[in-house]
Amino acid sequence: MIEGLSTQRKDLLAAPGHLLVMGGPGSGKSTIALLKASAEFQAGGLSKHQHVLFLSFARPTIARVAELATKLIDQGSRASLEIGTYHGFFWKLLRSHGYLIFGPGIIRILPPPEAAVRLADMDSREAREAEKLRLFEEEGFLHFDLFATVATDLLVRSKRLKQVICKSYPIVIVDEFQDTNEQEWAFIRALGDSSRLIALADPEQRIYEFRGADPKRIGEFTEAFKPKIFDFGTDNFRSNGRDITTFGNDLLVGKVAGKTYQDVTVVRYQFYQGLNSLFPVKASVIKRIKELLKEPANAWSLAVLVPSKRMMLQISDYLDIKSDGLPALRHDVALDTEAPALAAIALAGLLEGGNSASAIADRLVEDLIQHIRGRKGNESPPQAELKLAIALGTFLTTGAVTGKNRRRIVDSIGTVAEKRMSLSLSGDPEADWLAVRRLLSDSDAPEIQQLSDDVKYLRLLHKGAVLRSRLGDLWRQGGGYRNAPAAVRDALMQEHFSSTVRDWRGIHVMTIHKAKGKEFTEVVIAEGLHQGKIVRQNATPNEVAQARLALRVAVTRATNHATILTPKSDPCPLL
């Protein structure tokens, strides 16, 4: 492997001190970082209890790097390589050493679904940030957004601990460095006081400005650590021999108009009377699948990437059904966890059941309140929904409810509870889960139907899944599903921190931002006419620049082919 490297890459393997490695998608930044780790192991520079630490944002990236490490680093040295997410490492540090400055109290994670419920009443960003701090300082609940801040505080306030951590991890590889926010950068800076840092960055993949990524970040790293810089430019090993990266680079400088590409197809689609507006998208997906199936021995993956969550759900719903002469297409959806997780907890409460219909109904009311308050995630729910949640809470304490719509919801919950009392379960977790879900989908109240709609996006019951196994254990232990809601919460938490290699075969629907760090055989990128635009109407110059970077990221997720669909009547200006 080393014999075939360029002179520049060989120089990197021998370079001491802090390093900055830059390059476009597929340029081999992760590969050279692992080879650098291997070279350090071979040189004997690490003692028995020291590790090279590799940190990145996305679990798919971590899984891919871990798989790559098995090919590049000998088995004896791999035990000295630790690969994980930034969040996972922050939590490991806080869980083990948080007591040093925060006292003996237990630090408890506040998962996104529960955080959304607690923050639902906060109508400004400042109020939300203040409440996150209060929840941690007064109640010991740590929001994910505070992981980096609190972990940095721990290192800064305990110099002895920082010495121990830096001695344990004398070399730290920080992937996707261009996307770090101020808090993550502060943590990395603290480690860099004593550990050697290897930053992997692509300034043209900086698509997370909305969460604090800063175009000045790479310059700040250079100023702080004076690293030796290696720039691999447009080297491409991901889609080597194809012109996907060429398209992406042309896109950055506005040179794609009028050019043709072998491996990137731009389709300016029309709308057809009597057909769903998303018909061209689904037809394009089917066309690309037919091409992929010409080589049946190959495992393939296809991602449908869109600019907005709303369009993602619309496409998912359309793929799900047989209509317009097109078949239903089985697929996974990368939805934010809040809505499906809160719905799953409500469904698990029904699965557990109760001693009476009234007890089941009361619990379902409580769970519905949580779902209404938290399903929007980081967005505050509309005032009408907050008022409904308050009214349902009042019903729980007083038994009184006013208003025709609210009475209908309460009556529908009572009907679901009665049906649950007469439902016989089989002991098959998946079959019982679906049976209980039907109780929700058959309700005449849209708010209860929404629970069923949201929970379908949660894929936690496939063979070998933690939740399926846990529910099976509950049945074997007691002939029922007692504590099923706790099992759901545990499974969701394990899923969040899991580094298990996911099988990305098949069709996946997600937003462009969710695709960061992932690879697929093909991608189909689609935008709508009036909503779900890659470049929104009246976009500022900075928003256009961010859209350009995002589209480049989307296209370069493909290893074989990318298709971009834009409406003929209002095509994307970047194309």
Image (cartoon, rainbow, N blue to C red):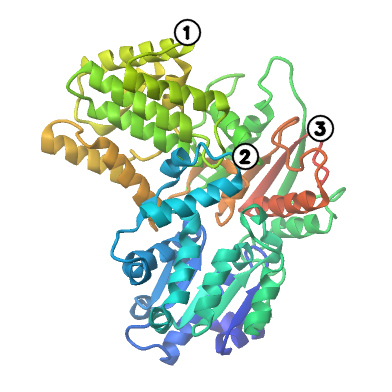
Q: In the figure, 373 relative to 141: above or below?
A: above
Above or below, comparing residue 155 to residue 407 in the picture: below
How far apart marks 1 and 2 lie (CA) works out to 49 Å
Residue 311 visible within the image: yes
Question: Depth check: 231 or 487 in front?
Answer: 487
Mark 2 or mark 3, which is nearer the start of the sequence?
2
Please tell me whether mark 1 sits on a helix, a strand or a loop. Answer: helix
> Residue beneath label 3, please?
568
In-front residue for pair 118/483: 118
Mark nearer the N terminus (1 vs 2):
2
Please tell me whether mark 2 sits on a helix, a strand or a loop: helix
Rendered residue at 40%/75% (across/down):
81
- Rounded to the nearest whole Å, what is the CA distance between mark 3 and mark 2? 20 Å
The residue carrying pointer 1 sits among few (fewer than 14), some (14 to 19) or many (20 or more) residues within 10 Å by Cα, namely few
The amino acid type, in three-letter code, at marker 2 is Arg
Q: Residue tagged by mark 1?
A: 404
- 398 or 487: which is nearer to us? 398
Mark 3 surroundings: few (<14), some (14-19) or many (≥20) residues within 10 A = few
> Which is closer to the viewer, label 1 or label 3?
1
In terms of sequence position, does the residue under pointer 1 or pointer 3 come before the other? 1
What's the residue type where badge 1 is placed? Answer: Lys
Per the image, label 3 sits on a secondary structure element best described as: loop
* Residue picked out by circle 2: 288
9 horizontally vs 43: left or right: right
Q: Amino acid at mark 3?
A: Lys
Residue 57 in the image: x percent, y percent? 52, 60
